[in-house]
Each structure stands twice: as structure tokens, then as C-alpha cells.
Amino acid sequence: MEPQEEARTARDPVARPPASSPSQTPHEEEHREGGTAPLGEEADGASADGLWQLPVERAERRPECSRCSRPQKVCLCPFLPLHPLHISTHLYVIQHPAEESKVLRTVPLLAACLPQDKCKVKIGRRFSEERDPELSDVCRRSGTLILYPGDEAANLEEFILDSPVYPSTIIIIDGTWSQAKDIFYKNSLFRLPKQVQLKTSISSQYVIRTQPTNRCLSTLECAAVALSILEKNNDIQETLLRPLQALCSFQLQHGAQIRLSKEYLLKNGLYPKPMPKNKRKLRKMELLMNSVKI
């Protein structure tokens, strides 16, 4: 495959220049044929050979805080609760593998605020009863909800008022919108729980990452709002948002810029990229410009 071929090429010795060239003089050619070379060329060759033999040093990752998973120099633990929040709701975060390596992810901050037995993060794109019996069992319980917007999703605040069984577990998908959509629709397990959504007027405080619309929230923000509703405690939302606010504030103080939503940029003629030629993507852009729910 092409990537493997490129990797092998990168490890192969660099091709040396030929022993002779049309520009060489007869005197230089005699030196070549006799197995000798000018002193300067010998020195250059020796130093070049030494370079090929130098070991490649891998860049070491900065030491990370064991609690907030941030580099120790920019640890956010002072903004976390002294002790994990006391909650009765179980939270399952289904994280797309691509999110795991992102530097400014919010799930580690969320997990650091909650008890380990109440917050579980499962990484992957495909889940089934055979691969994850625990998650399969959770999805089949009558008290489990999945937070994912859509026409079939009920308003969480309204749902808990009329539900005969009070929800004990909520599932949230962590990833970009396209990644979350892929996970939700290609895993039949996630269509077993009752689908709910948030109807809130708050704007995202995760201003260092571009969101599709002005109404989109980060995973941590979704969890903060959902848990405050389920636990009937607004202090939970405030406590969970504190480390996110600190993260954004620190990044902005050190060169990051406020990221406006794609919807805002399109509406105000500020979108920096050319409009896509793909009809499906172009249609999405048009819907964003007209504030139509995608």
C-alpha cells in the first residue's frame, strides 16, 4: 500500500551522487579510477556517513496531570471540584477514536469532576452485544436515555416530567457532528434507549473550537446541562463548566483566537474557505446560512 511504501522509502539510505560526471576533468577521473579522492571530498563523505548513522530521537510528550490529563505546567485541577460531584445518574460517553488524541478535548475534564463509577468513557466506532455486553445491557434498560438531537428526540426536561420510570443513565456521543451521526446511525444499540435532546438558549463557552451552529454545545457542556436537569441541581452545571472556562481563558491569553460558528461566518460573509462543489455539502452550507436545523 502507498503509506507503507512511503515509510520504507523514508528509511532507505539516501542515494549518493555518481562517481563521475561530465563536468569532471581527466585529472579528477584518474583520482576516481585509482580509488583516491581529494581530501575535502573524503572529509565530506565521512561526515555525511556519520549523519546517516545518528539515532533518531523521538520528541517526548510533556508530563501530564493524572487527574485532568492536561500538561502539568497548565494543569486545571485548581478549577475542578475538591471532591467528585455526588450524583445518582450514570453517564456513558461514547467517544470517537479521533477525539482521544486531540489536545483540547473536554471529556477528561468532565470525567475528572465525576465519580469513576458514575462516568464511563468507551472509545470506538462500532459497538455490539458481542463486543460490549455491558453497554448492550445498559442500552436495553428502561431507565436509559441517549442524548442525540433529531425529529424523534423528546425534550429532556419535558420527558422526565411524564416518564413512568425516572432515568438512571444517559449516553452522550463525543465527536464531530459527522462522527456522532455515523456512530448513532450505524450502531443499532443506540436506537434502543429513549432519544432525548436539550432545548436551551445558552451559547457554547467552548469558544476556542469552531462549532457548526450557534446552538451547538461541547460534550462537557451537554453533560453539564443534562446532569443538572436529571439531578435537579443547577450547581452541577456551574461546577462542570468552571474548568472549561479556565481552559478557554488560558488558551486565549496565549495566542488562541475566539472561533465563531460556521453558521455565523456564512451569514456574515466571513467564511474563509471556498464553497464546496459537492452538492450535498453545498446544501448543508445553504441550510446553515438560513438557520435551518440540519
Image (spheres, rainbow, N blue to C red):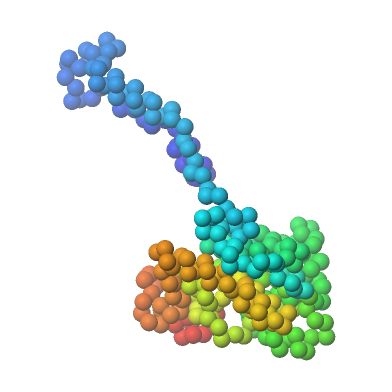
Going by the image, does 199 lie left or right of 24? right
* 26 and 156: which is toward the camera: 156
Q: Horizontal and vertical percent for residue 263?
A: 46, 79
Quarter of the rendering containing residue 176? bottom right
Which residue sits furthest top?
A: 34
Say which residue appears at 36% left-offset and 79% top-offset: 269
Q: Horizontal and vertical percent for residue 88?
A: 77, 74
Quarter of the rendering containing residue 86? bottom right
As displayed, is residue 94 above or below residue 60? below
Which quadrant of the figure contains the C terminus?
A: bottom right
Can I make out residue 73 in this image? Answer: yes
Quarter of the rendering containing residue 25? top left
Going by the image, does 151 lie left or right of 269? right
Say which residue appears at 66% left-offset and 77% top-offset: 236
Say which residue appears at 73% left-offset and 62% top-offset: 116
As displayed, is residue 30 above or below residue 284? above
Going by the image, does 149 lie left or right of 118? left
* 214 and 27: which is toward the camera: 214
Can I make out residue 286 in this image? Answer: no
Q: Horizontal and vertical percent for residue 175?
A: 59, 66
As displayed, is residue 107 above or below residue 215? above
Total marks shown come to: 0
Going by the image, does 132 lie left or right of 215? right
Q: Horizontal and vertical percent for residue 163?
A: 79, 86
Say which residue appears at 79% left-offset and 58% top-offset: 130
